[in-house]
Structure formats: C-alpha cells, structure tokens
Image (tube, grey):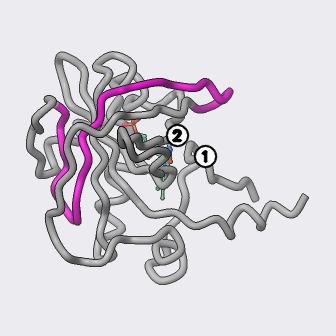
Amino acid sequence: MNTKTFQKISYGLYVVASKKPEFLNGQIANTVFQVASDPPIIAVSINKKNLTHECIETSKIFSISILSKDTPLEFIGWLGFRTGREVKKFEKVQYRIGVIGSPIVLDYAVGYFECELEKEIDVITHTVFFGRVREAEIISEADPMTYDYYHKIKGGKTQERAPTFIKT
Ligand SMILES: Cc1cc2nc3c(=O)[nH]c(=O)nc-3n(C[C@H](O)[C@H](O)[C@H](O)COP(=O)(O)O)c2cc1C
C-alpha cells in the first residue's frame, strides 16, 4: 500500500469545541465535512482518547470554527498538540457561548457552526460525530486554511491522534 496516497485527500482546518459542566475545551481537526443539507448535518472524526471526545459525549453539543489561512502555527499547536487534560486551553483563546450553549473559538475564525449531536459511529480508534447544524455565521472574508496549505506553505505537522496521521 502506498500510504502517500492518503495525502492526496483534501481537507480544511478547524477548531472543534465542546464542554463539560465544569469546563470548556477544544481541539484542532481537519476531518470536517458536510454530509447532508436538509437538515444540514456536518461530520467530524474525533480520537476516543481526546478530552474533546469526552466533552461531546457528555454535552451532546459542539461547535466548529473554520480557521483562516493566516492562523499561526503556535495557535494550532496550542489546540492541536496540547490536551485539555494538561492545560486550560480556553484561558488563552477568545470565545463566546453560542445560541445552543456551545463554546465557539473566535481567533482566526472565518466562520463557525453550532451543532447538536445527531448520531455517532464507532470507527475503532475514533468516533465520527454527526452534528445537526443549529447556527452558522460568517465572521470574516479571509480565505479558509486548507490542509495542503498548512503543510506545504506553513510547514505545519500532523499530530499522532489525527485520523490522517502517517507513521514514518
Ligand atoms: C493539523 C492537525 C489536524 C488534526 N486533526 C484531527 C482530527 O481530525 N481528529 C482528531 O481527533 N484529532 C485531530 N488532531 C489532533 C488533536 O487536535 C489533538 O489530539 C489534541 O491534542 C486533542 O486535544 P484534547 O485532548 O484537548 O481534546 C489534529 C491535530 C493537528 C495538529
């Protein structure tokens, strides 16, 4: 198998945020896509070990912020290479609580969705969460980041819990 073939799949880059009764948390994810339009449903694949996974399972709500091309690597590192089990991520991000109660990360966001958990599918290491979109807003007209741009132009890396991680 030529594992480099997987790198030809296109994605964007997002912050998925959710909460537990006592705290807010979020993480970077590239595996976001729209699966239906009426009603609008968005899917994301989240590693079972992530704190964000636990938050979505508990609260049944999550938000997805679409990151812009100018998002700094340090910001992606804070949410994508650190876990909320060790650091309080929301102390260093700008956010607001949306109409359904989910935390929405605003830094470098060109827009966001607020979702209620509709369905989930166990895929061994990850869970694919399907969220029914309850709110969607555009924040800026900046270009969204693509996964390709993140790797090739910004020199970004993939974290080992990302579904797209390739062991070398
Ligand atoms: C570029 C990039 C893409 C990522 N994509 C995903 C993804 O789609 N799904 C996932 O579960 N983790 C993904 N991750 C890894 C999580 O962001 C990472 O495991 C994070 O530390 C989880 O944080 P938490 O434990 O606070 O939830 C990605 C990381 C990076 C840097």
Reading the image, the residue beneath label 1 is: 163
Residue sitting at x 91%, y 58%: 1
Residues at discs 1 and 2 in contact (Cβ within 8 Å): yes
The answer to which of marks 1 and 2 sits earlier in the sequence is: 2
Give the Cα separation between the discs numbered 1 and 2: 7 Å
Q: Residue furthest front?
A: 38
Is the CB of mark 2 within 8 Å of ligand 1? yes
Which element carries disc 2, helix, strand or loop? strand
Is the CB of mark 1 within 8 Å of ligand 1? yes
Q: Where is residue 78? Give x, y as percent.
A: 32, 52
Residue sitting at x 24%, y 20%: 20
67 in the magenta segment: no
Reading the image, the residue beneath label 2 is: 45
Give the image quarter of residue 111: bottom left
In front of the other: 24 or 74: 24
In front of the other: 68 or 99: 99
**Magenta-highlighted residues:** 102-126
